[in-house]
Amino acid sequence: MLWNVIVQIFYMVENILWMNGIIQMKFAQKCRIIVMGILFLFFLICEGTVGFGENAPAYELLIMAILLGLLFEGNIWKNQIKIWCSVFYMNVVSAPIQTTFHLIERHVEYEWWEQYQDIIYESLFLLALLCLIFLISKNDRWKQIIEKLSVPYYIMGLALSFCAAALGSFVYVFGQDLPAEANDFIEIICLILREMIYLAVIVFIELNELRKQYQEESRLKSEHIEMLKEYYRTQEYHMQEMRKMHHDIQVHLTVVKDYLDEGKLEKASRYLEQIDIGVRKTNGKMIDVGNELVNAVLTRERDKFTPEISLCCRGHVSNEKKISDFDLCTILSNLVTNAREACEKLKKEEKVVTVDIKEYDGLIYLKVQNPVEWSIDVETMGRRSSKKDVEEHGYGLQNVKDVVRVNDGKIEFSVKEGVFSVDVIV
């Protein structure tokens, strides 16, 4: 009974490492973790005292899945899909160890091996998991791909991992009556085939993600080209307006001079105010931070604002920066969109989105601010699984974080005196 309890603890630790370190599932809030811990302790007590009878493996697997669903954030039942579909994929790590143990069993008859092989197996499996987690933690791209995996990928992985496991079990049983050397050869070949099945899924996911990334980048670049065309058309219109005003300036000055000569100061003042309003309207439609594509993106986003929301842009972007125009526009577009959507929920009349851009030594220092009237947990900002984050600032923050990570930049969120700020360095 005691050994069964120890095995269940091993299984739980392995599953937690797999879900958190490999599948990139985030831990839930403390209250759910505490509930899960209490239920797991109760499960261990039952396992160590009465057990679960003949159907113990099925009951234990079901209970373990439910407990893991509580441990990680998000909907418990949606978590079950990831857990049930991915846990069988752990064979990609365990299969080589199992095959090695089968080879040893055929050629080693030491008594101590029979006694300790389970402990040795679980220890090696944990060590292999930790090594794999370490490799993934050092590769941001792998982490991003895993975090974005959709349910169909998990289902496909489940189907193929089941086929691979069935192949391994068949070969192991079939080879029992064969000579040890022949059995060793067949099982090694089977292991290679099984690992190739697992790797085929990984390669397919990688290629499919690259395809989707290429399509998304192509779509965004096409949008940016259209933005630039629209921006140039708008600029041409503004230049025509400025030329008209310059052409008429002599007439305006003559009118003002006549009013002043006649002592009509009030009429001269009103006439100058009208001229000033016209100039402000023309200049107010123009956003210029020194980069035409950035100007076009900000102008496009500003055009989506409702009349009660205004956009204030300050700063300058040169061509000597390290980040590409495409990535910078992706960051700005998402942040300004999220700020606009947040302002649309405000009850106050004054709604201003501010964008400050500074540049130093090739790095861009970007700050986007908008007023808020609700509390925000900045620690969870940008996580796809956070319902609160989705409601308040949309999915765009995850895209921003991905771009910042690719460019080795930094991003920080803060709330102070009713103003939500996003600071980016890239």
Image (spheres, rainbow, N blue to C red):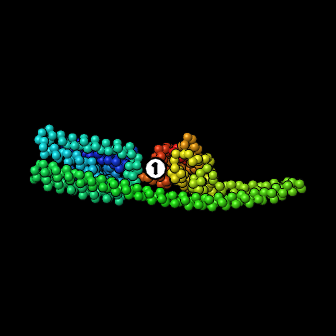
Indicate the amino acid at tag 1.
Answer: Asp
When asked about the image quadrant of residue 161, the answer is bottom left
When asked about the image quadrant of residue 77, the answer is bottom left
Residue 360, placed above or below residue 251: above
Residue 95: image location, x then y, percent: 23, 49
Horizontal relation, residue 4 to residue 388: left or right: left
Residue 178: image location, x then y, percent: 10, 52
Residue hosting label 1: 402
Question: Which residue is pictured at 12% across the width and 43% down the height?
Answer: 107
Q: Residue furthest right?
A: 262
Residue 275: image location, x then y, percent: 76, 56
Q: Residue furthest front?
A: 320
Foreground of the two, 160 or 389: 160
Foreground of the two, 274 or 364: 364
Foreground of the two, 157 or 57: 157
Q: Neighbour class for label 1 at 10 Å: few (<14), some, many (≥20)?
A: some
Residue at disc 1, secondary structure: helix
Horizontal relation, residue 63 to residue 218: left or right: left
The quadrant of the rendering that contains the N terminus is top left
When asked about the image quadrant of residue 237, the answer is bottom right
Residue 278: image location, x then y, percent: 73, 57
Question: Which residue is pictured at 24% across the width and 41% down the height?
Answer: 123
Horizontal relation, residue 329 to residue 21: left or right: right
Question: Which residue is pictured at 78% across the width and 57% down the height?
Answer: 249
Report the number of numbered marks.
1
Residue 371 shows in the view = no
Residue 52 shows in the view = yes
Question: Which residue is pictured at 47% across the width and 49% down the height?
Answer: 403
